[in-house]
Amino acid sequence: MSVRRGSIRMTGLALALFAALHGVAAAADNDVTPAVADAAADKAKTLDSISVIGQGETRQVQRITIEDVKILPPGSSALKVLASKPGVHFESADPFGNYEWSTRFSLRGFNQNRLGFTLDGIPLGDMSYGNNNGLHISRALIAENLGTAELAEGIGALGTASTGDLGGTVQFFSADPLSKFGVTASQGFGTDAARRTFVRLDTGNYNGFSAYLSGAYSTADKWKGDGSQTQKQFNGKAVYDFGDSRVGALLTTSSRDETDYQDLSLDMLHRLGWNWDNYAPNWNRAVNAANGVYTGGVTNADDAYYAGRGLRDDTVGSLFGDFALAEGLRFKATGYYHTDRGQGHWWTPYQASYPGTPQQVPISIRTTEYGIDRTGVVSSLNWDIGMHHIEAGVWYEDSNHNVHRNYYFISGPVDDRRFLRNPDIRVFAQHYETTTTQYYLQDSMHLLDDRLSVDVGFKAPDSKIKAQATPGLLKTYASGDLEAKKNFLPQVGASYKLGDGYEVFGSYAKNIAAFQAGVNGPLATTQVAFNAFGKQLRPEESRTIEGGVRSVTDFYEASLALYDVKFKNRLLVISQCSGIMGCPSAYANVGSVTSRGAELAVNFKLTPELRWNNSLSYNKSTYDNNYVDGGVVVPTKDKTTVDSPKQLFASELVWLHGPWDMRVSANYTGKRYYTYLNDASVPSYWIFNAEAGYDFGKLGETVQDLKLALNVTNLADKKYFSSIGTNGFVPSDPQGQFATLQVGAPRAAMLTATVRF
């Protein structure tokens, strides 16, 4: 299966984007109008436009629609679609961008733990694999139900429900129900036994009420090794429009089962090759390796394990409303509930099953078990008065998160494609309660006959985490509390129309990030360690300055942006052992990080049928200080931040001729380091992808439309490292022995038929 590898990058002159704009939507007949969630949703409404460079915005903003998805196989992550935008770095080890253990997304050097993500205003947290405060967009929404997405590379909208957006936000919006009754179904078949089925029923509009019910089933074998990736999803949405107001509901469910790929090191690559993976289904070889008997180039217990797996079950429900209270006065609110249960399985050689008995086996299943139950509300009041658009809002969330580490004894290669119960050993257990309150106020002014737009506002986040550990277990992790709070985080910006399609813009913002709950947070350590450093921790914070110029003509759209970011109290997480051993990570405050760069986006409309979209980015992100570890100075000053390519480039050629839709893309990702001292790295690479589609139109009285599409990812069958840091990062790895790398997927194809009745 081929990973249409992070169609993104070239961080070298990072910036905005030339996109061919086909039209802005607005009719009741709109297939892809996004749900109303906040002011950004209104700006994001598009019909079949290709990209919007954020004209009139005081911040660097890009938008995508369902049209942008066509270069990727059906079911691909919406994050992978964003990979073609300037400043965006996306990686995954599967062709669809959905394998969460390997998924990595960053903006201007800020990884996803320091970004903000929402769906219809509902916070998705940091979308990390170790679930603690949200869920991944690939689970939250069926890919075919994406309406639009708004990307803010450096400064997110004040109303974004996130306490992690130090370096930008991504707001996703689900598609609205169609105005006419109909059934849409698609079936895809592809490389590695890939299959995807999608069905959606739209009720049509009945006196202002419309709804859809949809389901998707997708499965694909791993492109190397044994096992598959399988997901079942349901999405339902209903809206009722009355007058200038609207109410509605959204319900999504997801059940995901993914078999892991083995993390590699550079040394393993040289010894074992690109296609090396876990031992399954060869149980005897796994047992021998666990007993120290190695064969075929294997030299240690961490070269492979029998298998690994990730299970996630999620349900998200929301009620939303957008009410016209009076002339120029609107109130919007979204209430939501999210429940998640997850397990990560690792067949470990570091804990025997039934030790000291005749049934002893040198392998057991080690699990990390997650639970989330969170409720919240996002609301805003909008008032248009004269030249002012005043917006005030509040976000409140109460989140309960449980995390356990357990061992389950086995007698052989059991089927673990299910949630395991009744562990034989419980290593640790923690309960986290996180309470978040965030207020914001903003005034957007339009002056000089609307040539000048000025935004002035602030937000005030307060996030409290309280951890309670279960005593008396094999390991007792910390109990304690942390708070990240600021009463005034300003954000100001302006844009000015120069005439002839040109405008300039600039903005400034300060942000903080809440402390992280769960296995990747500072409370996931011993009580002694937390007592020593916990109260000294300060929330990570950032200061961002950006500015640039946009230009729009009949021939092209372009955007160029420059930025300067100062990241203070940067907390490095330092892995202390191999991931499967599960050692508590160490933490070091390395002071500040400086990121400077540029982003260029240029989209040409060469002819009415031919478009050429390009983005080029340059980002220099370095640590400003050394840090001390165990009394030893680690010289990180002026080193490039880990997993932060300096150059990214993306280019896509689109030809639309009658019933034909043909696309080809090229993507370049620069060199990346996975050690803080920059003594170990993975090289740059190019990836090419293609799509060809044909629309047969209406066939008879029943079939309203029939389309065929062929998607091919990694056309050149490039061998490359996709994700790095899957097991974290280390100060130094001169021998290349730290297994924290994932290989990108080879060439893959998928043929899909879509019919609408």
Image (cartoon, rainbow, N blue to C red):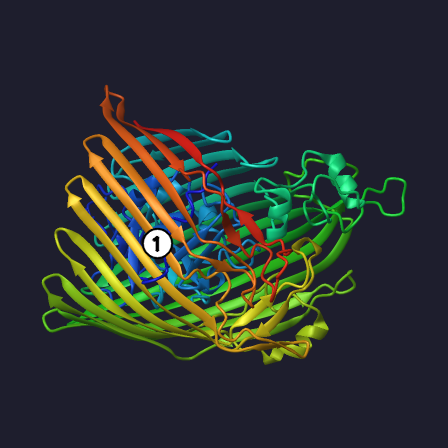
> Which quarter of the rendering shows the C terminus?
top left
Is residue 594 visible to us here? yes
Residue 123, position in %: x, y?
44, 58
The picture quadrant where one finds residue 633 is: bottom right
- Residue type highlighted by circle 1: Phe
Where disc 1 sits, the SS reads strand
The number of numbered badges drawn on the structure is 1
In the image, 223: left or right of 173? right
The picture quadrant where one finds residue 505 is: bottom left
Disc 1: CA contacts within 10 A as few (<14), some (14-19) or many (>=20): many
Residue 311, position in %: x, y?
59, 44
Q: Is residue 358 above or below residue 64?
A: above
Is residue 166 visible to us here? no
What residue is rendered at 51% in x and 34% in y?
Answer: 220
In the image, 332: left or right of 138? left
Residue 735, position in %: x, y?
64, 58
In the image, 309: left or right of 88? right
In the image, 562: left or right of 515? left
Extreme-top residue of the structure: 700
Q: Is residue 289 above or below residue 329?
A: above
What residue is rendered at 62% in x and 44% in y?
Answer: 309
User: Which residue is denoted by mark 1 in the rendering?
Assistant: 649
Residue 340, position in %: x, y?
55, 51
